């Protein structure tokens, strides 16, 4: 039996799961179910990444131990996965004993091979902020980028993982193989991280305790990525006796992640595996973010949409369908209640739901539920039949390419064709004259077969509702298989349908949207999201403020500045004409996010050159700094900065002055 191993990231249990986590998990679940249907022996792994400073802090705030804290949130994750019908085969927690043991072994092996060495983390330390910074992160005066006070040189003992020996092989992996999907992202990784020289990775910390102790130096705990990434092999039994599946399932067929952690999976994970002399995973599928009103949905921002709340109103399958259908691999997808309700109404209630209920109702009305066996085919039937027959191969190719939204589009194309076929063949007219019985039976049979094939292929995506449709069209589950999805004419000629409940009721959009917005408002955190506040500056007089000329401007063009990770070059219409501005926001915005948007421009700044490109002014943005226990690595601090450009209402004309 062929094998298939697929993984989600292991999520931080530092807050409740949201629809972003749901996307990756539901996508992996649909692929896992599809592969099982195809006859693969599947291992589908998910889990939680439970160590780190942030968890330690949150637990302390809640007055519980870190273990108690994560236990509580893991229960919520598992409950949501149950509710969303996630068919994972294994759930790993990085606090599981077997994982701890394996990670200690991996760390030691890397050390023994000479890839991990003890060094000194040298950085700039800001005492009030208790933060380490690298030279490049300091502000333009060489001060703390958060509070702009002086920093001092400081050192911290830490272990480092040597990245440079693997640079060439990783570059080839990204550019010459089909490891990365979509491959278009390889250039960004190569240019930003590999070509400038891979920095060694800090892999231990001494400043907090909630982590896996380094066996040979217990003041240190393993820091973030060696612990987290290893889960993909420790969960199979690598380095432990808890499982015995490593030889069977490794290398993984697909790791799926969002773009925020692509770099760790595309560069660091292959480097660790190369150092351990283990095979590399076959594919890394990277998707974009689900955004909410344009901003990344995240726990700390308080714009989190609760998937369970939505599922309870519309059904878990409708939510699964919506998020899978909206997200194109590699791009972001904006979540809104309006889009979701429209999508459910258009595709599920109108297109699929109507096809099923009309077909079943007509079979019931004209034949008492059981089709007669005489048939009369006509040439017009051919297009629908051949589309339905060809569908399985198309969907196979989409699943191989991990383009789930395209698989759904292909399936719904056939469903729409079937609805059109009803309009073309007009069964209600055929039904008026019993002389047309054989023709009418043919039409209804073709429709029932099309429903059987499309709903079989949809069942990995919507596992609870599709079997209900099979019941209505008189198809037992043993003919709703992958094999039979490739054949037309499998239902018995005298099939009996069973009228049933409406599977996807139409949603009253206006009423629901009001109610949902209210619910989301009510469930959002009441307080402002926590950020690290920068102290207020000294007072100034109004005349000082008056010196700053701020104008509304529109972004006409935008591109990355070559050789810079941080800079974007923008052409703005400031009302008087065009001007060029360079802005250090490339880390947070891509050119497509910005073109067409109106912003606030500091218009009377003297020109300056950034990376050799002239900048005439500055775009106003907010700097949001949060202390986290999360992902990033080399800077010795756990502070994350997010820069948010202030977009303004499109109705304000370019050139308008702020006063
Ligand atoms: O990064 N849109 O955990 P995490 C789409 N523990 N997907 C989203 C999303 C959004 N708005 N928000 C989160 C970590 N995700 C590490 C991973 S793996 C060895 C360690 C999904 O809880 C997406 O899959 O921050 C993203 O990659 C993952 O959650 C990050 O989850």
Image (cartoon, rainbow, N blue to C red):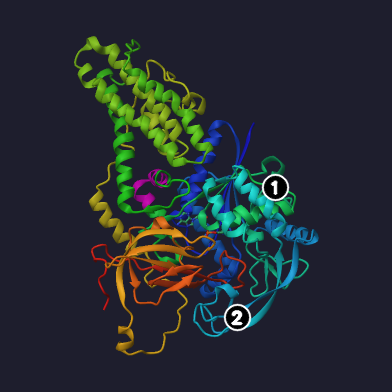
Please state, as top left, top right, bottom left or bottom right, where the C terminus lies in the image.
bottom left
Mark 1 C-beta to ligand 1 under 8 Å: no
**Does label 2 or label 1 sit earlier along the sequence?**
2
Residue in front for this viewpoint, 319 or 599: 599
Q: Which residues are magenta?
A: 310-323
Give the spatial CA distance, label 2 vs label 1: 44 Å
Question: Could you tell me which quadrant the N terminus lies in?
Answer: top right
Q: Is residue 182 above or below residue 210?
A: above
Q: Main secondary structure of the magenta part?
A: helix
Would residue 319 be counted in the magenta stretch?
yes
Q: Nearer the viewer, mark 2 or mark 1?
A: 2
Image coords of residue 238 (percent x, y): 72, 50
Element marked by disc 1 = loop
At a point 55% along the width and 76% down the height, the residue shown is 138
Give the x, y percent position of residue 374: 33, 10
Location of residue 150 (image quadrant):
bottom right
Where residue 490 sits: x, y (%)? 44, 19
Viewer-nearest residue: 375 or 288: 288
**Residue 224 placement, left or right of 569:** right
* Camera sees residue 474: no
Q: Is residue 561 magenta?
A: no
- Crowding at dot 2, Cα within 10 Å, few <14 / some 14-19 / many 20+, comes out as many
Residue depicted at 47% across the width and 63% down the height: 586
The quadrant holding residue 191 is bottom right
Q: Residue at x 50, y 68 (%)?
A: 612
Label 1: how many Cα within 10 Å (few below 14, some 14–19, many 20+): few
- Residue ID for mark 1: 243
In this view, the residue farthest toward the right is 112
Q: Which mark is residue 125?
A: 2
Q: In this rendered view, identify the residue nearer to me: 249 or 477.
A: 249
């Amino acid at each position: 039996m062929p094998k298939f191993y697929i993984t989600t990231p292991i999520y931080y249990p530092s807050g409740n799961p949201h629809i972003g986590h749901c996307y990756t998990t539901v996508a992996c679940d649909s692929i896992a179910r599809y592969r099982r249907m195809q006859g693969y022996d599947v291992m589908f792994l998910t889990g939680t990444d439970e160590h780190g400073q942030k968890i330690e802090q949150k637990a302390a705030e809640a007055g519980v131990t870190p273990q108690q804290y994560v236990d509580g949130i893991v229960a919520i994750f598992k409950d949501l996965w149950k509710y969303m019908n996630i068919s994972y085969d294994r759930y790993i927690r990085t606090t599981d004993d077997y994982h701890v043991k394996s990670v200690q072994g991996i760390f030691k092996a890397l050390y023994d091979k000479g890839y991990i060495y003890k060094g000194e983390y040298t950085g700039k330390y800001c005492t009030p902020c208790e933060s380490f910074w690298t030279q490049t992160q300091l502000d333009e005066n060489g001060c703390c980028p958060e509070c702009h006070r002086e920093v001092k040189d400081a050192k911290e003992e830490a272990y480092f993982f040597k990245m440079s020996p693997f640079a060439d092989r990783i570059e080839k992996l990204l550019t010459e193989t089909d490891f990365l999907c979509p491959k278009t992202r390889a250039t960004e990784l190569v240019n930003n991280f590999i070509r400038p020289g891979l920095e060694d990775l800090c892999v231990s910390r001494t400043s907090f305790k909630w982590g896996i102790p380094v066996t040979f130096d217990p003041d240190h705990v393993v820091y973030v990525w060696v612990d987290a990434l290893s889960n993909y092999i420790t969960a199979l039994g690598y380095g432990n006796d808890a499982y015995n599946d490593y030889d069977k399932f490794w290398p993984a067929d697909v790791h799926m992640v969002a773009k925020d952690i692509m770099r760790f999976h595309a560069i660091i994970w292959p480097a660790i595996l190369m150092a351990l002399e283990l095979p590399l995973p076959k594919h890394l599928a990277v998707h974009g973010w689900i955004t909410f009103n344009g901003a990344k949905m995240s726990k700390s921002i308080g714009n989190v949409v609760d998937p369970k709340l939505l599922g309870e109103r519309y059904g878990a399958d409708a939510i699964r369908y919506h998020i899978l259908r909206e997200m194109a691999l590699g791009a972001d997808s904006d979540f809104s209640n309006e889009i979701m309700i429209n999508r459910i109404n258009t595709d599920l209630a109108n297109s699929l739901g109507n096809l099923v209920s009309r077909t079943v109702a007509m079979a019931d009305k004209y034949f008492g539920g059981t089709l007669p066996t005489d048939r009369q085919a006509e040439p017009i039937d051919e297009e629908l039949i051949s589309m339905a027959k060809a569908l399985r191969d198309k969907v196979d190719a989409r699943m191989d390419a991990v383009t789930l939204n395209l698989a759904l589009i292909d399936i719904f194309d056939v469903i729409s064709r079937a609805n059109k076929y009803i309009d073309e063949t007009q069964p209600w007219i055929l039904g008026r004259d019993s002389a047309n019985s054989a023709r009418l039976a043919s039409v209804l049979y073709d429709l029932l077969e099309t429903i059987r094939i499309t709903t079989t292929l949809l069942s990995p995506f919507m596992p609870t509702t599709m079997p209900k449709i099979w019941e209505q069209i008189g198809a037992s589950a043993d003919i709703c298989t992958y094999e039979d999805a490739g054949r037309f004419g499998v239902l018995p000629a005298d099939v009996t349908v069973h009228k049933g409940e409406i599977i996807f009721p139409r949603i009253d959009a206006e009423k629901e949207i009001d109610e949902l917005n209210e619910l989301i408002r009510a469930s959002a955190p009441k307080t402002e999201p926590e950020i690290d506040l920068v102290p207020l500056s000294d007072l100034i007089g109004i005349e000082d403020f008056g010196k700053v000329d701020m104008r509304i401007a529109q972004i006409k063009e935008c591109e990355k500045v070559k050789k810079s990770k941080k800079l974007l070059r923008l052409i703005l219409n400031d009302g008087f004409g065009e001007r060029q501005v360079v802005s250090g926001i490339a880390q947070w915005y891509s050119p497509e996010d910005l073109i067409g948007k109106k912003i606030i421009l500091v218009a009377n700044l003297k020109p300056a050159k950034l990376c050799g490109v002239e900048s005439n002014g500055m775009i106003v943005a907010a700097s949001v700094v949060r202390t986290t226990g999360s992902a990033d690595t080399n800077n010795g601090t756990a502070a994350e900065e997010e820069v948010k450009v202030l977009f303004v209402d499109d109705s304000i004309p370019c050139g308008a002055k702020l006063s």
